[in-house]
Amino acid sequence: MSLAQMLQQSGAITSMASELGIDEGTAKTAAGALLPAIVAGMGRSATGGATTPDPLGGLGGLAGAILGGSGASAGGLLDAVLGNSPTPTAAGNDILGNIFGSKDVSRSVASEVAAMTGLDEGLLKKMLPILAMAVAGYMAKQATGAGTGGAAPSQNPLGGILGSIVGGMMKR
């Protein structure tokens, strides 16, 4: 199952559509077009070649943003997206900052996806942090579920999940 399908089944696509005032088909198209950039950015963060040993296998700041950044609990990121209140996007912006490095890259991603899909660039800019939270929250729930067996610090459940997501996207 693809990450897009997992997000669809979790209700994240429906929730984003409702929050952004768009139909579910548009939300699904936008998410599908934005996901490769988010996952690729996470992959780059995971293989970023840190100069100091990172017990999280290169995920350092990204893992911090996913597993506890901006005051969110591991599953809290996805729960925030699925909630009835407007999604507080600070955590999503932190994640985007970790994976893209600057707001200019996020803007560029939105611009390129808008050009490819014909979707409104402003809509895509609003969706990016929410989608990043949904992806990271889903990963965090998977990681904490996988890590409940007393995983040693040298093991990296987030890296394993990210690897399977990136691997699955490359097989398309």
Image (cartoon, helix red, strand yellow):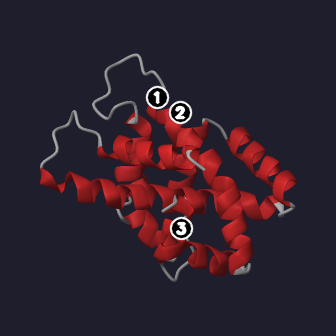
Task: Give the CA distance from mark 3 to mark 2.
Answer: 23 Å
On screen, residue 50 versus residue 22, left or right, reads left
Residue that mark 1 sits on? 47
Task: Give the CA distance from mark 1 to mark 2.
Answer: 5 Å
| Residue 170 percent across, percent down from the top left | 57, 43
Question: Given contact means CB atoms under 8 Å apart, are the residues at marks 1 and 2 in contact?
Answer: yes
Q: Amino acid at mark 2?
A: Arg
The disc, 3 or 2, on the residue closer to the chain's N-terminal end is 3
Q: In the rendering, which numbered label is found on residue 44?
A: 2
Q: Can residue 73 be spotted in the picture?
A: no
Q: Give the secondary structure at mark 1.
A: loop
Q: Give the secondary structure at mark 3.
A: helix
Question: Given contact means CB atoms under 8 Å apart, are the residues at marks 3 and 1 in contact?
Answer: no
Q: Amino acid at mark 3?
A: Gln
| Residue 83 percent across, percent down from the top left | 48, 79
The quadrant where residue 73 appears: bottom left
Q: In the rendering, which numbered label is found on residue 131?
A: none
| Residue 24 percent across, percent down from the top left | 68, 79
Instruction: Report the number of discs.
Output: 3
Q: Nearer the viewer, mark 3 or mark 1?
A: 3
Q: Label 2: few (<14), some or many (≥20) within 10 Å?
A: some
The outermost residue toward the front is: 171
Where is 169 relative to 98, above or below? below
Residue that mark 3 sits on? 5
Residue at (49% x, 26% y) in the render: 48
Q: Label 3: few (<14), some or many (≥20) within 10 Å?
A: few
| Residue 65 percent across, percent down from the top left | 43, 47
Residue at (12% x, 48% y) in the render: 150
Q: Give the secondary structure at mark 2.
A: helix
